[in-house]
Amino acid sequence: MDKDSKASKMDRILAQQRTYVAERERGYREKALKLYPWICGRCTREFTRTNLRELTVHHRDHNHDNNPSDGSNWELLCIYCHDEEHTKFVDFIRYGDAEQKDISPATFSPFADLKEKMKKGP
């Protein structure tokens, strides 16, 4: 397969993916906008038709294919709060639960004997 045909195949695949995502999003977004008031669920910013594009649908379980018709997996968030929710989720995956009570404190103290080391000199 030559380079041009690989590129055109990739372009086709990406175009199909963009179309699929746009259609799926349009479906649940329209439903969510009918179910819920146009207010960000975090910062309570209110939206009108002029700035409605800045109000997004957040999937509470982070699964974009879980779209129950009652909207129980959705919440409307402004683009800023939506970004923050995804950042928190990525941090949770990466670092675990920040509210764990059994996190042991660090035991290494790099400056514990600094005074003695300063007295000794280089």
Image: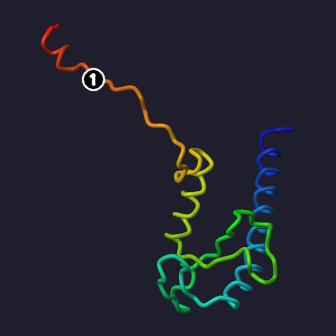
Q: Nearer the viewer, residue 42 or 38?
A: 42
Query: Which residue is pictured at 49% across the width and 88% down the height?
Result: 46
Q: Nearer the viewer, residue 88 or 25?
A: 88
Q: Which quarter of the figure is the N terminus placed in?
A: top right
Q: Is residue 112 left or right of residue 13?
A: left
- Render colour scheme: rainbow
Query: Which residue is pictured at 59% across the width and 51% down the height?
Result: 92
- Residue 22: x, y in percent? 74, 72
Helix, strand or loop at disc 1?
loop
Query: Which residue is pictured at 60% across the width and 56% down the height?
Result: 89
Please state which amino acid type lies under the numbered disc 1: Ala
Picture quadrant where residue 95 is located: top right
* 104 to 11, vertically: above or below: above
Residue found farthest to the right: 1
Q: Is residue 80 left or right of residue 30?
A: left
Q: Which quarter of the figure is the C terminus placed in?
A: top left
- Find disc 1 in the rendering and name its residue: 112
Residue found farthest to the front: 102
- Residue 50: x, y in percent? 52, 90
Query: Which residue is pictured at 53% across the width and 53% down the height?
Result: 99
Q: Is residue 31 left or right of residue 57?
A: right
* 112 to 14, vertically: above or below: above
Q: Nearer the viewer, residue 6 or 17?
A: 17
* 37 to 114, vertically: above or below: below
